[in-house]
Amino acid sequence: MTYIQHQSGEIEKPAIKFNLSAFLDYFIPPEVQVQPDAHRRARMFMLSHAFGPLLGNVIPLYLHFIVKIQMDYRFWIFLISVMVFWVYPFALRVTKRYQILAFISVQNLIFCILWACYSYGGIYSPFLSWALIIPLLAFFYLPATGTIRNILLIQIFGSVGVFGALVVGGFTFPAVDLSQFQLIGIISTLSASIYVVMMALYFANVFREQGEFQRELGSLMATADNMINLTAAAQQATTAKADFITSMSHELRTPLNAVIGYSQLLLEDVDEKADAVFARDVERIHGAGTYLLRLVDDVLDFSKLEAGKMLSHASAGSLSEMVGKIASDITEHVTSNTYTLECDIKPSNAPLNADWQTLKKAIHHLIYGIVADGAGGAIRIQARENQGNIAVRITDPKIRDNETQLAGLFDVFSNDSDASATKYGSVGIAFALSLKFAHLVGGKIIVETDIKGRRVFALTIPANAAGDAAQAAA
Amino acid sequence: MINVLIVEDNELNRDMLQRRLQRRGYSVVSAVDGPQGIEMALSGAPDIILMDVALGDMDGWEATRILKSNEKTRHMPVIALTAHALESDRQKSVEIGCADFETKPISLDALIIKIEKHVNRTV
């Protein structure tokens, strides 16, 4: 509620101004609107054509109703020459010829003022003060530079010059009773002044808006600069983090390799001595060390993937051979955790170009994630080539009743590592990492539940026939 | 008996690998850095060299390059031992002239297969 009140209070004023601008812009051609200077001038043009005749008409109306002047051709020409200004906005909207219309409008203005002076008092006409607004409006409408300025000056001084020549040359102006025009003289001067003030106010407003716009632009630029700096800092922080994790995991690997190597050394000893309890203990050290090393490698890979430091390498290979190798490389891990592997690979016709190393990591991490559950059973790997993709389906043998377990599976450390978790901790980042590997090569993983309630991980990565790549390279 | 030279700066890794290979019937000597490794390759004439790539001042790549540019040591097969299974490391080992490539933690059985393969090839 507070928000709405605040909003309406803020917006009310500019909304009215915006409507006026929208009204003025309705008549202005789009190609003029895109040039800020020309647009501002066109708005002045529109403003004076929309509201100018309201002020200008005061004079013929006064002459008609108060002075009760004769309704002859002089009156009608004067009235029409004022009223015709209302036609210009529509002419502009239809013809889109702003410059020509501006010149014609200036000439129209000169004519209507000089005609009023000619008809009603000559050099003593009370309407002569309107001549002031001619140059004002002319240079509001059109830029005061080059040819355009010269044309306007010729228009103004040419017309006024002709009128002056008539006066000086002793031309007989139509006879009028000047005493009738005393009051209209004052009104006329006032109207002209109001007109000039109105235009000046509008112009001042334009300047103010321009200033505000400049300030806003400045603050936007500052914000943009700030954002760029923040982004750079964030990028730097990510890189720094990745560098830290890289060097840290290097440091961790060395002692871990020693733990693994020496426990292997001991295991080789025990084989000879056949001490079952001792062998089991050493095997546990070895198993824990190997798992810890895998976690260190996972964190390293994860950090590299996040920092964009992991690259994709495609190479040619046969689907059945490659996936067969990928499966056999992880068989030991699977079998030592009471699982087995079943492979169903449909051989592809030709060798495929794909990032096999990344495919291997994605598949292995899916299997690490499945095996971490510890329930045991046969993990099924199906692989097919499918319309420019390698499609691998990995089925987790565990039957689950709850489908919501799928949500959040690929988030880091927020998986369903429940009480059934395992010899060596939770799923960790295995699924999350698997998805990141898939994304690295433009692939995806979809997890679904089959009819029996088993999770099926559908991994797809792009691949093309190895021949195509060779042709493209040639 | 096959003579193996291990070039490895980490004491534990060196000791561990040396003992495990000795137990499998190899004659093993070891060097703690690149320059010592080159010296021992020249003086000891090993049948095969296991080169850790992440050595101190002179890294394993550089040491291998020197061995490969020397008439007396050029023929000795070098197996690069790297910390990660990076594609870039694999490519580099081929470029420099390593006979093979093995990632730590070392699987002894896999390493022995590689040693036998390359020693028999040179003999």
Image (cartoon, coloured by chain):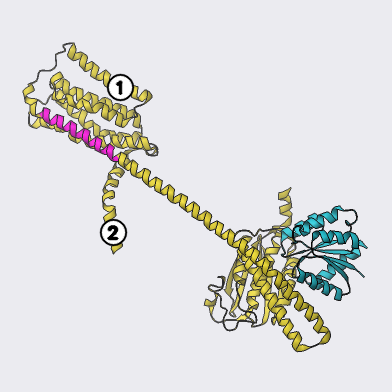
Quarter assignment of residue A85: top left
Letter of the chain that mark 2 sits on in the rendering: A
Is A9 in front, or is B58?
Answer: B58
Q: How many marks?
A: 2
Q: Position of residue A13 (x, y in %)?
A: 26, 50
Where is the N terminus of chain A found, in terms of image quarters? bottom left
Towards the viewer: A206 or A78:
A206
* Disc number lying in front (2 or 1): 2
- Which numbered disc flags the more N-terminal residue, 2 or 1? 2
Judging depth in this view, the residue of A140 and A75 nearest the camera is A140
Is disc 1 on the same chain as disc 2?
Answer: yes
Relative to A305, say whether B110 is above or below: below
A45 or B60: which is nearer to us?
A: B60
Find the magenta span and give its range.
A184-205
What element does badge 1 sit on?
helix
Query: To which residue does mark 2 refer?
Result: A6
Residue at 81% in and 82% down? A269
> For residue A204: magenta?
yes
**Looking at the image, residue A51 lies above or below residue A365:** above
- Residue A153's tag is 1
Residue A281 point in image, percent of width and height: 72, 85
Callout 2 secondary element = helix
What's the amino acid at mark 1?
Leu
- Say which colour chain B has: cyan
Rendered hue of chain A is yellow
Q: Which mark is residue A323?
A: none
Q: Few, some or many C-alpha atoms within 10 Å of disc 1 (few <14, some 14-19, many ≥20)?
A: some
The image quadrant of residue A103 is: top left
Distance of label 2 from label 1 (alpha carbons): 51 Å
**Dominant secondary structure of the magenta stretch?**
helix
